[in-house]
Image (cartoon, rainbow, N blue to C red):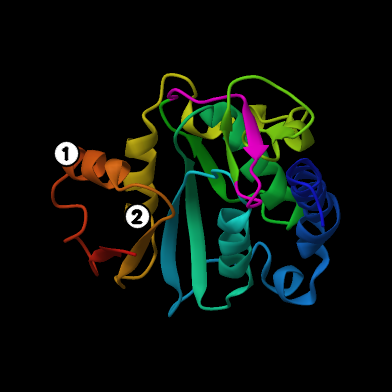
Amino acid sequence: AISGSRRCNNAVGTMGYLIEEDLCTVSTTETVQKHRAAPTSSGRTCVVVDCELANCLGDLWAIAYLLSAPNVDLRYVLATGGDTRAKLRVISKFLAHCGRADVEVGAGPTGPSEPWLEAGDDGVLRPCSQYHPRCGPNPLLRDWAKKFDDRQQLARGGYPAYDPIVRLRDALDSRVDDTEAVVLCLGSLENVERLLDLDEDVFARRGGARVA
């Protein structure tokens, strides 16, 4: 039988392997490389992503899928919740590895967040306030991206004076075709509410937009 402590250590170790080996090599896949830096063109769906990047890598796999889809025009990714500056670095470095540094990433308002993730006996990573050997960083790829130079990314929106919700609206309005856009929420709907408070007509303009 495997002890609970060993299962936890295995869970953190496995996530570390996925980070260093599997996830990062998505940038070398033929499909992503084929469509990287693809220009906006007729018939492609404008997509913006609201991304919490919580305690797993699912959000980055979703972004990788969007990058590989020939009918998707990924325009903006908004990092929300907790240490959004750290999350911005993670997402920006990931996009750069995929050859899509042209995609703008925004840093939403920071919020309360524990600095570590602890693997439980069930292998699920949960927030933790103090480090011990069963912990990993929160967000999970924080250490991987901590030295990534994000100054160019931040300069796009005039950080820290800019409003990331304004940039989200502008990304939707910047699409070339009058086709329906998609706001993909990989977390809560708080930023959609803020977007509607800022501009109640944003989903009705041009070809409209919907939340997924």
The vertical placement of 178 against 161, above or below, is below
Give the alpha-carbon distance from disc 1 to disc 2, as whole Å.
15 Å
Residue range (magenta): 110-124
Q: Residues within 10 Å of mark 1 (few under 14, many from 20)?
A: few
Which residue type does callout 2 highlight? Leu
Residue 28 occupies quadrant: bottom right
Q: Main secondary structure of the magenta part?
A: loop
Question: What is the x, y in percent for residue 50?
Answer: 42, 49
Q: Is residue 112 magenta?
A: yes
Q: Nearer the viewer, residue 25 or 187?
A: 187
The answer to whether residue 58 is left or right of residue 169 is right
The vertical placement of 161 against 17, above or below, is above
* Residue shown at 43% from the left, 62% from the top: 47
* Residue shown at 52% from the left, 30% from the top: 84
Q: Is residue 48 magenta?
A: no
Query: Label 2: which residue?
Result: 172
Which residue type does callout 1 highlight? Asp
Tag shown at residue 197? 1
Quick one: quadrant of the N terminus?
Answer: bottom right
* Residue shown at 43% from the left, 32% from the top: 108
Residue 134 occupies quadrant: top right
Question: What is the x, y in percent for residue 26?
Answer: 76, 63
Q: Nearer the viewer, residue 184 or 126?
A: 126
Question: What is the x, y in percent for residue 172?
Answer: 35, 54
